[in-house]
Image (cartoon, helix red, strand yellow):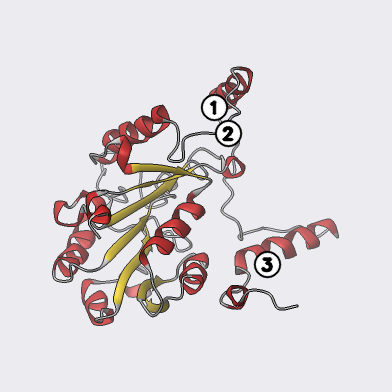
Amino acid sequence: MQLSSLLQRFNEPETLKMAKLGRELRAKGFDITDLSLGEPDFDTPDHIKAAAKKAIDDNYSHYTPVAGYLDLREAVCTKLKRDNGLDYTPDQVIISTGAKQSIYNTVMSIVDQGDEVIIPSPFWVTYSEIVKMAGGEVKIVNTSIKNGYKITASELEAAITAKTKLFMFSSPCNPSGAVYSKEELTALAGVFKKHPGIFIMSDEIYEYINYEGNPDSAEATIGKHESIAQFDLLKDRVILINGLSKGYAMTGWRLGYIAAHEKRYRGR
């Protein structure tokens, strides 16, 4: 019996292979330091667990609106304004079963057969596999330690072709931990300004797990998370991906979201 050719377009993510091997070795008695899955080293805060228990008692167990409950989408908008200075409305937010689904939905709604997708390396391995599922062509740009494993404006410009449809990156980066400064993002935004047909997917799931400085300290600009969605010239092309898995130790809860300006998409 012949299965779908879709199954031949992608490989099992290396992170899942590593996690499986780690569990097998641990079961055999080996002392394993597992750097595969991005699992926080703390548990879900008690007030969140209490709210979830109350939600069950209050019968929040039926179908939700497709985009998610309105009050949850409003809460996402409040968070984006409070923490990132970004203005979104609830109709520009979609709740998903984890940030991975948000990324999948983003790629599948943008990328067609033969479209090129630029991904700076190192990157979360699932990015490229989702692009392959959509029929897109992955164009990897290898970054260097000299630039902190971050793509530069000149490297981005050199990678763009007439077929480029999407740019995918994360900041803070999984797996390098690199954080793009506002100045670095400004330079990238200048390149995208010259290429209005390219969408930008900004994966910000590791926003609160930042090893480059305390944003509350006197040196607040060092390591401070900045979103490329802050630039007005890009606001209708940036798809912001985030969720609760990393910052709130809710990996198994499967709660993520997309924030994006909807007018451009409705007009396509």
- Distance, label 2 to label 3, CA atoms, is 26 Å
Query: Gap between marks 3 and 1, in whole Å?
Result: 31 Å
> Can residue 143 be seen by looking at this rendering?
no
Name the amino acid type tagged 3: Lys
| Amino acid at circle 2 | Thr
Judging by the rendered image, the residue that carries numbered circle 1 is 48
Task: Tell whether 182 sits left or right of 243.
Answer: left
Q: Position of residue 202 (x, y in %)?
A: 34, 57
Give the number of the disc on residue 17: 3
Q: Position of residue 239 (x, y in %)?
A: 32, 54
Q: Which element type, helix, strand or loop, lies under badge 2?
A: loop
Q: Residue furthest right?
A: 28
> Which quadrant does the C terminus fall into?
bottom left
Left or right, 215 with reference to 30: left
Q: Is residue 219 above or below residue 152?
A: above
The 10 Å Cα crowd at callout 1, few under 14, some 14 to 19, many 20 or more, is few
Q: Are marks 3 and 1 in contact (CB under 8 Å)?
A: no
Residue at 14%, 56% (x, y): give it.
233
Quadrant including the N terminus = bottom right
Taking the spot 59% from the left edge, 49% from the top edge, the residue there is 39
**Residue plotted at (59% across, 44% down):** 41
The one nearer the camera, 267 or 162, is 267
Residue under label 2, please give it. Answer: 44
Q: Secondary structure at mark 1?
A: helix
